């Protein structure tokens, strides 16, 4: 393979959703660190702006674009603004997820006891958000004729199931299936579509509460299910996403890669 850095993304522009914190921030920094120009999307504009500024301070190119990925019109406006600032978008990372904007992911009741009104926040961001972004991004990606990359952050909840998170599991599994169909449609255009399936990331709790958190029986029990006995970090996620966005991954599509410390194994 020509060139020294097989992960180099020079000349490409990326759109990363929910990139104002957590895994999305790590992904945005990693893509920018390998020379992609990055549109940093978040529902919360201040978060996106802070990450875009961080990239520019490090010498990279970035713009912040506010949008709720669950809202098609706002996704369209954000993509237009991103392409105007950075040029055609050829890398899309669908990272926004969990329970959507302004909502925490928590264990629910057994599914049959849940309020049907509570399902929407999971599907709106984790499934429709992914479909909206792909629907907006693909026409220009196909027309440019330069290929492209779409990576969606899914969850082991959607691969192997998690009790009392059924709506979330369903939305994530739906997104993964949607990406497989998209891979079939886009392959002839040199566009790859893959999923990165995460298990639990290290929660963003204040430093002075961490010791107590890790001493809890519940945390210990959860960690005992991990072959590599720690929770994940944004860097763990970013490495796989960067690889899938690179030329090194041009013959990989329609796949789901667990990045999960061995929480589950894939065949
Ligand atoms: N954290 C985990 O343990 C874990 C486990 C498995 C999978 N995941 C998945 O990884 C991804 C990243 O998770 P995280 O925990 O790093 O994220 P996070 O919750 O820490 O941050 C997500 C960011 O996305 C933004 N966001 C939420 N909904 C949005 C929307 N509709 N439109 C635009 N922005 C939106 C939020 O404002 C926030 O800044 C998600 O898809 C999540 O489902 C996370």
Image (cartoon, grey):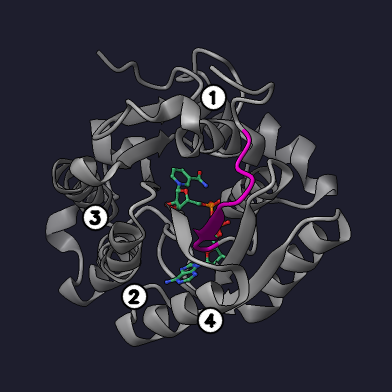
- Among numbered discs 4 and 2, the one appearing first in the sequence: 2
The stretch in magenta equals: 8-18
**Residue under the point 48% across and 65% down:** 88
For label 1, the residue is 223
Residue where numbered disc 4 is placed:
81
Magenta segment includes 17: yes
Q: Earlier in the sequence, mark 4 or mark 1?
A: 4
Q: Earlier in the sequence, mark 3 or mark 4?
A: 4
Q: Nearer the viewer, mark 3 or mark 1?
A: 3
Foreground: 124 or 210?
A: 124
Residue at (55%, 69%) from the top-left corner? Answer: 41
Residue hosting label 3: 171
CB contact under 8 Å: marks 3 and 4: no
- Image vertical order of residue 1 relative to residue 130, above or below: above
Give the mark toward the camera: 4 or 2. 4
Q: Nearer the viewer, mark 3 or mark 4?
A: 4
Callout 3: 10 Å neighbours few (<14), some, many (20+)? Answer: many
- Mark 1, Cα crowd under 10 Å, few <14 / some 14-19 / many 20+, is some
């Amino acid at each position: 393979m020509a060139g020294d850095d097989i992960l180099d993304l020079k000349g490409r522009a990326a759109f990363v959703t929910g990139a104002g914190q957590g895994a999305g921030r790590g992904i945005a920094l990693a893509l920018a660190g390998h020379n992609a120009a990055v549109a940093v999307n978040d529902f919360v504009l201040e978060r996106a702006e802070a990450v875009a500024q961080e990239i520019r301070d490090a010498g990279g190119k970035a713009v912040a674009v506010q949008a709720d990925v669950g809202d098609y019109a706002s996704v369209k406006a954000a993509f237009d603004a991103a392409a105007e600032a950075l040029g055609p978008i050829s890398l899309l990372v669908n990272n926004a997820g969990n329970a959507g904007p302004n909502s925490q992911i928590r264990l629910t009741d057994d599914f049959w006891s849940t309020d049907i009104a509570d399902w929407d926040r999971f599907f709106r961001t984790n499934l429709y958000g992914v479909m909206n972004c792909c629907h907006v991004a693909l026409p220009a990606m196909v027309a440019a004729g330069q290929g492209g990359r779409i990576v969606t952050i899914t969850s082991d909840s959607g691969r192997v199931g998690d009790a009392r998170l059924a709506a979330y599991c369903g939305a994530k599994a739906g997104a993964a299936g949607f990406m497989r169909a998209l891979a079939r449609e886009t392959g002839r255009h040199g566009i790859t579509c893959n999923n990165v399936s995460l298990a639990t990331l290290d929660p963003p709790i204040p430093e002075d509460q961490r010791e107590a958190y890790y001493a809890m029986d519940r945390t210990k029990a959860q960690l005992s299910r991990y072959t590599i006995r720690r929770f994940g970090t944004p860097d763990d996620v970013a490495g796989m996403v960067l690889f899938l966005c690179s030329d090194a991954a041009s013959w990989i599509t329609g796949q789901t890669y667990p990045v999960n410390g061995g929480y589950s194994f894939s065949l």
